Amino acid sequence: MELDLRNKVVVVTGAARGIGAVIAQRFAGEGSTVVAFDLAFPDPAEEPVAAHPVEQVLCNVTDPESVQAAVDEVARRHGTIDVLVNNAGINVEGPVAEIAWERWKACFDVNVGGVFLMSQAVAPLMQAAGGGRIINAASFAAIVPSVASAAYSASKSAVVQLTRVLASELGPWDITVNAYAPGMVPTAMNGFAEMPTEAQDRLLDTLSLRRWESPDDVANLLIFLASDAASYITGTLLDVSGGKLATQIPARAYGR
Ligand code: NAI
């Protein structure tokens, strides 16, 4: 099966670091023209040279003017946007009793509002082109939430419902809209890899595939979703969590 993404214009939000940076590199490796959106980018002098070229545009996905200006800039440079990956997200932790209202709102502004604004700005380009792909970062937390993750889990569940509605509204233009649910990818957002061994073991024991997820595991799914091979998949939430809690105690299979 050929997943040909050459000549596609791909925008990845939140792509200055973490999973988004790898997603951007992987699409660029497939021959796509990739534009990374983020609040700021690292100094290139302090970064290893990237394997593939990725353009950078400053964009705050919570700000309608910033979003429109960034989308207009891509349209000016490349004419259209074929694939939008709404990866930008923040984690707000804490029990409901303690989450400050401002933090709650910030979580929804980025995680849900960002998907809303970006999709609203990019959809007209895709409609004019008669097709496109919107791929939204949800989370396993949208399937089973954790204690002290009310803001994050609720925001990611909202992303799933927004995805379904967008899929139906944009279906007439052959634009597919899907969400994906990673499980546990060690990044700056969660610090999994820096936790004490026992804490890491407790988390790994929830996985059928008892290993941390890599950003490439996520990127592999996204490349498929962006390709012609996935043209009949829309409105779904795809679990890419390594079988997190697929069974009640997956660690039993490992004799733990
Ligand atoms: P990260 O914190 O390493 O990277 C997030 C990026 O989003 C950063 O570059 C940040 O500057 C950018 N960003 C934040 N607010 C923004 C805004 N207002 N406008 C533009 N960019 C903004 O996070 P990570 O771990 O790479 O996560 C990426 C996505 O995957 C997020 O949506 C996250 O919720 C989701 N996810 C991550 C999981 C994990 O285990 N790391 C698990 C499930 C979902």
Image: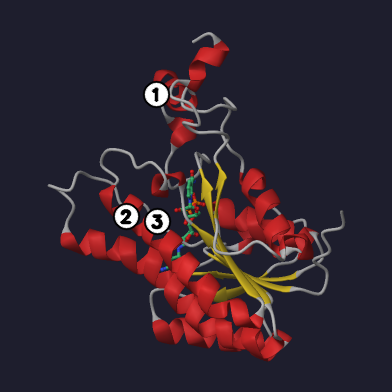
Q: Establish if 85 lies above or below 185.
A: below
In this picture, residue 180 sits left or right of residue 245: right
Q: Position of residue 177 (x, y in %)?
A: 57, 68
At horizontal 87% and vertical 53% (from top left) the residue drawn is 1
Does 128 sit left or right of 252 as displayed? right
Q: Kindly identify the residue that appears in the image at 56 percent across and 81 percent down.
A: 122
How many numbered marks, from 0 up? Answer: 3
Q: Quadrant of residue 61?
A: bottom left
Three-letter amino acid code of the residue under disc 3: Lys
Mark yes or no: residue 84 visible.
no
Callout 2: few (<14), some (14-19), or many (20+) C-alpha neighbours within 10 Å?
some
Find residue 199 and report its horizontal and vertical position in percent.
Answer: 39, 23
The picture places residue 145, in percent across and down from the top left corner, at 34, 42
Q: Does the numbered disc 3 mark a residue whose Cβ is under 8 Å from ligand 1?
A: yes
**Local crowd at mark 3 within 10 Å, few (<14), some, or many (≥20)?**
many
Asked if residue 177 is positioned above or below residue 210 in the image, the reply reads below
Residue at which label 1 appears: 199
Q: CB atoms at circles 2 and 3 under 8 Å apart?
A: yes
Q: Quadrant of residue 44?
A: bottom right
Q: Earlier in the sequence, mark 1 or mark 3?
A: 3
Q: Nearer the viewer, residue 141 or 68?
A: 141
Residue 231 spot, x, y in % from top left: 72, 66
- Mark 2 sits near ligand 1, with its Cβ under 8 Å away: no
The residue identified by callout 3 is: 156
